[in-house]
């Protein structure tokens, strides 16, 4: 959780628990939206860009970086292929990766890694 609003702090502000949770969720949604906007707006994001966004959002750059790491961890460790410990047919995976590359920036070092992850998840779905 990137945003912290401790129960004691919320009580001092006169907030009920559900209001505290709702405020945290709203703040985290704003952060997600801001990150998505940043990553969509530029072909290459720098550390300075992330720090500038953190300043704009009034959060620690370190916390924002942790949030980004959390996203990548969830992406690469989630999905059906991870849940099932799926092992695809090599040829099917190669074909699936080529299909998924159509949706990814082919100039990126991440392209084959992202394409493989998405193809693995799709193939794991088809296995059922």
Image: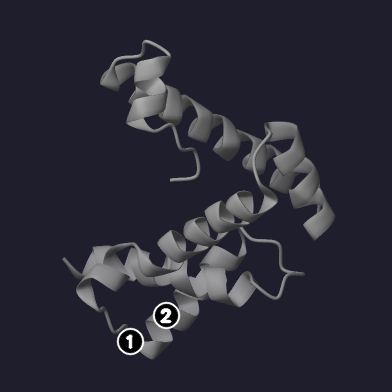
Residue 127 placement: quadrant: bottom left
Q: Which residue is mark 2?
A: 93
Q: CA distance from mark 2 to mark 1?
A: 6 Å
Q: In the rendered image, is residue 46 in sight?
A: no
Residue drawn at x 63%, y 71% is 111
Classify residue 33 as left or right of residue 42. left
Classify residue 16 as left or right of residue 27. left
**Quadrant showing the C terminus:** bottom left
- Towards the viewer: 16 or 105: 16
Residue drawn at x 68%, y 34% is 58
Residue drawn at x 39%, y 80% is 92
- Looking at the picture, how far across and down is residue 24, in whole percent? 43, 29
- Towards the viewer: 101 or 15: 15
Mark 2 neighbour density, 10 Å: few (under 14) some (14–19) many (20 or more) = many
- Towards the viewer: 119 or 71: 71
Residue 15 placement: quadrant: top left
Numbered disc total: 2
- Secondary structure category for the residue under label 2: helix
Q: Are marks 2 and 1 in contact (CB under 8 Å)?
A: yes
How are the residues colored?
A: one colour
Residue 113 placement: quadrant: bottom right
- Looking at the picture, how far across and down is residue 18, in whole percent? 28, 20
- Secondary structure category for the residue under label 1: loop
- Looking at the picture, how far across and down is residue 28, in whole percent? 50, 35
Mark 1 neighbour density, 10 Å: few (under 14) some (14–19) many (20 or more) = few
Residue 89: numbered disc? 1
Residue projecting furthest to the left: 128
Classify residue 59 as left or right of residue 99. right
């Amino acid at each position: 959780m990137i945003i912290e609003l401790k129960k004691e702090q919320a009580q001092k502000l006169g907030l009920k628990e559900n209001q505290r949770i709702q405020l945290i969720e709203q703040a985290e949604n704003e952060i997600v939206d801001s990150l998505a906007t940043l990553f969509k707006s530029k072909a290459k994001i720098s550390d300075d860009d992330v720090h500038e966004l953190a300043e704009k959002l009034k959060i620690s750059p370190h916390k924002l970086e942790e949030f980004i790491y959390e996203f990548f961890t969830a992406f690469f460790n989630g999905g059906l292929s991870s849940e099932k410990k799926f092992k695809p047919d090599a040829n099917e995976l190669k074909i699936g990766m080529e299909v998924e590359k159509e949706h990814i920036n082919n100039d990126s070092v991440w392209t084959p890694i992202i394409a493989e992850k998405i193809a693995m998840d799709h193939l794991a779905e088809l296995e059922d």
